[in-house]
Amino acid sequence: MSIPDEYLCPITRDVMKNPVLLIEDGYSYEENALKSWLENHNTSPMTNNFLKNRTFISNRALKSLINDFLSHKRITSEKLSREFLSFKILTRRPYVDWKSKPTITIILSVLGPCQVGKTILSQCLQYGHWPANMPIPPSTIGCDLLFYHLSKLFKEQFAVALRLNDPSGQDRFESVTNLYFRQCHGALFLTDMTNPESLERLEQYWYPRLKQLSINPVEVILVCTKLDLFEKQEPVYREAYLRRVEQFATKHQIPIVHVSAYRGDNIEYLFKRMIIQIMENDELIDPLVTQALSCVKQKSVKKTSPCCL
Ligand SMILES: Nc1nc2c(ncn2[C@@H]2O[C@H](COP(=O)(O)OP(=O)(O)OP(=O)(O)O)[C@@H](O)[C@H]2O)c(=O)[nH]1
Ligand SMILES: [Mg+2]
């Protein structure tokens, strides 16, 4: 459900809270934005024509339309969250006959410098935590791909597959990893809570790369790993580290999730949260739905078309 253009203030491009109608040009603007515009200009923000009359009045009809629209959007998104809170993330398609259902493939990239725990996090999702007797994997070469499936149909119609890209954190694989910044719907940026350098690398190198390379909008979460080890650190260290993480997240408006793969803290929650964020983002989910439906159409055309021999 994308936002109709007429609900956005032409000056700020945000949804209007207090729309006012500028009588002379007939356009509506956010009240405060128009006031500051008129302090510095004698022209209409939309037509650029000189204003003889600078009077504006509250546009109550538009305000009530916007409020209705927002509450409908909130209800749909609350419903989606409730429905999806009960899905499970599985390593296999839950039912064989879902093969014929339109399938949405969500692509997540697990990104961050070397040894922050990308592979452990990606692989432990199937167990909810990293099993104590499982051998620690070697440092990743290139990129590993993992596939998961949701146990519930999205909108009771679409099967959902999850592809995790787990690229290497080593600089020598930079040209390989560029691809995983470009081709993803969600990016999990990992920092090791016992290693402040890993946060610095995220800030200076990994996160800016997303901005440079991504073509489409991407949902982002900042993931602080190894919570089990962090809790054993000195209070002074912990406080300083958390403050820096908070600063970074606030600056870029990214949510933070603390995890421990060894204890299983927040593992399932992290991935569910990311999936829900993507499903609530119309710019991401609408094209995925269209793509899933067109794949089904193409398959059925192939099946019904007669043999050309
Ligand atoms: N204590 C603890 N150690 C962890 C946790 N997650 C990962 N580690 C350790 O961190 C190290 C690196 O983990 P990996 O998952 O291989 O790291 P990576 O980010 O994939 O590293 P590269 O593939 O080299 O880029 C391993 O020794 C893990 O055992 C955790 O939650 N707690
Ligand atoms: Mg790895």
Image (tube, rainbow, N blue to C red):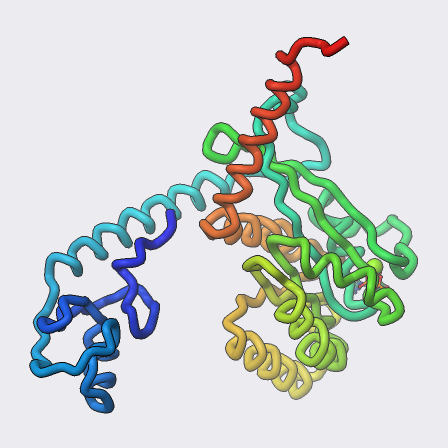
At x 87%, y 49%, the residue is 134
Q: From the image, which quarter does the C terminus lie in? A: top right
Pick the front one: 214 or 157: 214
Q: Quadrant of residue 246?
A: bottom right
Left or right placement of residue 8 versus residue 161 in this view: left
Pick the front one: 114 or 24: 24
The image quadrant where one finds ligand 2 is: bottom right
Eyeballing the image, is 292 above or below 42? Answer: above
* Residue reaching furthest to the bottom: 40
Left or right placement of residue 181 versus residue 280 in this view: right
Pick the front one: 75 or 292: 292
At x 19%, y 53%, the residue is 65
The picture places residue 281, in percent across and down from the top left corner, at: 47, 52
At x 66%, y 43%, the residue is 162
The picture places residue 156, in percent across and down from the top left corner, at: 47, 29
Pick the front one: 205 or 306: 306
At x 52%, y 44%, the residue is 287
Count up the numbered dots. 0
Eyeballing the image, is 78 above or below 47? Answer: above
The picture places residue 218, in percent across and down from the top left corner, at: 57, 59
Q: Quadrant of residue 54?
A: bottom left
Eyeballing the image, is 230 above or below 241? Answer: above
Left or right placement of residue 30 versus residue 146 in this view: left
Q: Quadrant of residue 207?
A: bottom right
